[in-house]
Image: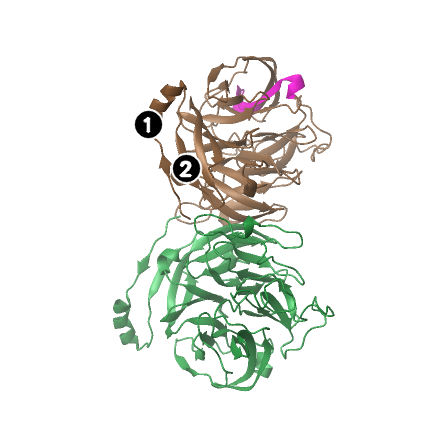
Chain colours: A green, B brown
Amino acid sequence: MTLTLRHYSALTFAALCLCFGSVHAQDEILAEAQTTKLRITTVADGLVHPWGMVFLPNGDMLVTERAGTLRRVTPEGEKGPAIEGLPTIVSRGQGGLLDVTLDPDFDDNRWVYVAFSEPGDGGTSTAVARGQLDGNQLNNVQVIFSQQPKVQSDGHFGSRLVFADDGTLFITLGDRQQSYEAADAQDLGSHIGTVVRIYPDGRVPASNPFVGDDNALPEIWSYGHRNIQGADLHPTTRELWTGEHGPQGGDEINRTRAGENYGWPIITYGVHYGGATILDGKTHAEGMEQPIFYWTPSIANAGMTFYTGDKFPQWQNNLLVTGLRSRLLSRLVVEGDRVIHEERLLHDELGLRLRDIVQGPDDFLYLLTDERDGKILRMEPAN
Amino acid sequence: MTLTLRHYSALTFAALCLCFGSVHAQDEILAEAQTTKLRITTVADGLVHPWGMVFLPNGDMLVTERAGTLRRVTPEGEKGPAIEGLPTIVSRGQGGLLDVTLDPDFDDNRWVYVAFSEPGDGGTSTAVARGQLDGNQLNNVQVIFSQQPKVQSDGHFGSRLVFADDGTLFITLGDRQQSYEAADAQDLGSHIGTVVRIYPDGRVPASNPFVGDDNALPEIWSYGHRNIQGADLHPTTRELWTGEHGPQGGDEINRTRAGENYGWPIITYGVHYGGATILDGKTHAEGMEQPIFYWTPSIANAGMTFYTGDKFPQWQNNLLVTGLRSRLLSRLVVEGDRVIHEERLLHDELGLRLRDIVQGPDDFLYLLTDERDGKILRMEPAN
């Protein structure tokens, strides 16, 4: 694959920007994918470790910064003040203010949902709150979910929020990267290492797979997960697909079905540095699901989205997955339940940790860079 | 992935070899895969563009050289004289003596099958002959299949030979890389771009999908193929899987089922140099199958085998695919009908065009290098 790269320096554009009175950076980077040329422009910068993003009906974006700030950003890149009304958030290690999404009926009810690290007895846990957005204020804020138990750890909060077509809310969680004294991802008596499914007000759907099982928490949808930072609905089957980090290698994409066990920490394709396998090299076990696709060595996958717009016609229904340490964007061509091809993009052109990817209402793709001076980038076809 | 490389020069070993009286090269190369370290040693060299290989019950190998020679090679690497009795072979361009396999009842009937380029009215075609091996002689030689029509081309002969469990013989063919004036891979009135299925004596099984169709040749099993140089039975489903070259990109692995159309030259993931797609960028069409996996850019895939031995326990049922121009070995982790992971091996350590890969009776893997001084290499775990 030939990669071409043109990077117009911020300095060059500073002059241009002054002429046009623009207030934000206008870097433009061109990249070449197998099927199209790409133009990547900076929509906004100066965001501190942005983690999640959602578009409001008027075209503004709501963006989380991990330190605990939720901001509105206009399409022109102007950042609003911190939105008020969020619950208490612990920002430490991997924790803080994480994903954000809108209610499917947002136009009518103004509910905004955020995932965050919640303090409490025993340490912290992932939690989800909602509040009704009015200008730069969240009103009637309610915590609708708290992962149990709280533990002493600053890692593996998971935290993507995805509404299913039936109006229930999927919350992807992590194993909290602790010693497993409290619980591990195989323990259905905790939410450690699970995906949960609730109604938007926190009630538990009676159709959840473990409802009525005295040994399981009823919110659990699936379990055996390590740290899920990417999730989206498959565009045709409408099932939940998730992406989770492996230990060293073994990053996974999973079709995440009700009641199923995805194996962590019993089975994994992860390996230690030097090539030795962990967990006795066990990759299969009865009653545990295989991934749809995995990466060894790790790409450190974070956000992901199925592309369903018309701006990249050859990427229709492709799964786009961002990488942190790998600093790449992986394009997976998905046919039914199979990944039939992978293209790796943007590593050379951007060289930035990519936390999340979102399809905009304009069908362009928007990336969040996980940096101290984090950016919202827009990716368009350049042809 | 960290790659380590130690290459003991032929010179160093020449001294050792003299001590032990060995007559062939003993280069040893170490490589590191994700799951195991690998030791690669030269079993035999001095083979001129070897193309196909099969193990005889006594441990000797039968190896084809593209120029038209079939030879026996002992486990110690001693090459026998040219085996006599082969039909007339046209060795030009990609054509010549290609694959070789044994009858499932070889112990009793001594039938050896070879694929080759056959001269005749109109040009050449792929053909398959069999003969009964007696020492260095093939007796009772019969041509059991000739691709129709013969055309003026030296390319895309396909040519892998795989026996199904029911005793029928799959022959993988190519589109002959011509102007398609005669026929193309969508034309069921020719064998161009098809897989055919016959009995070992050349008769057509009544269960073939197009038997009774006046517009189709009855030997055809599947069609719409470009150039299939790799084929093996899936270890659990026992279906035929094949590997074919794309035009520029779009190299494919296909689960190759009765009567199905694999799309060439109508649909492809191939692209032209510079990134423009060919065939109007059409990748899908009604009634045409999607690949199980594809490569863009091309790896120029050639031979392939599912690994089913016990020497590489973590490679159980993995599909190993050799690359020509890419000079690599691709390890595909297959779960059911899905490729869930790819590891690329040997490019850095060998840097040689790899034509074929065969699992030996010792469960080690044997590679053929497509060079003027071609080799048989044995790959073992080095741990």
Going by the picture, which residue comes out furthest to the front?
Answer: A181
- State whether the magenta stretch is mostly helix, strand or loop: strand
Q: Residue A24 or B191: which is nearer the viewer?
A: A24
For this view, does A201 lie left or right of residue A231? right
> Tag 1, which chain?
B
**Disc 2 residue crowd, few under 14, some 14–19, many 20+, Cα 10 Å:** many
Tags 1 and 2 on a common chain: yes
The x and y percentages for residue A106 are 57, 79
Depth check: A21 or B160 in front?
A: B160
From what the image shows, is residue A269 above or below residue B67?
Answer: below
Label 1 residue SS: helix
Q: Which amino acid is tagged 1?
A: Thr
- Does residue B14 appear left or right of residue A126 in this picture? left
Residue at 44% over, 39% down: B328
Q: Are marks 1 and 2 in contact (CB under 8 Å)?
A: no
Dot 1 or dot 2: first in sequence order is 1
Q: Element type at marker 2?
A: strand
The magenta stretch is B106-127
Is residue A365 at least partly visible in the picture? no
Please tell me which residue is depicted at 53% across the width and 70% down the height of the picture. A159
| Protein chain holding label 2 | B
In the rendered image, residue B205, in percent from the top left (x then y), is placed at 71, 28
Marking on residue B30: 2
Give coordinates of residue A197: x percent, y percent.
64, 70
Quarter placement of the C terminus of chain A: bottom left
Q: Name the residue beneath numbered marker 1.
A: B12
- Do we see residue A46 in this rendering? yes
Image location of residue B157, percent across then percent down: 52, 29
Q: Amino acid at mark 2?
A: Leu
Tell me: residue B198, above or below residue A81: above
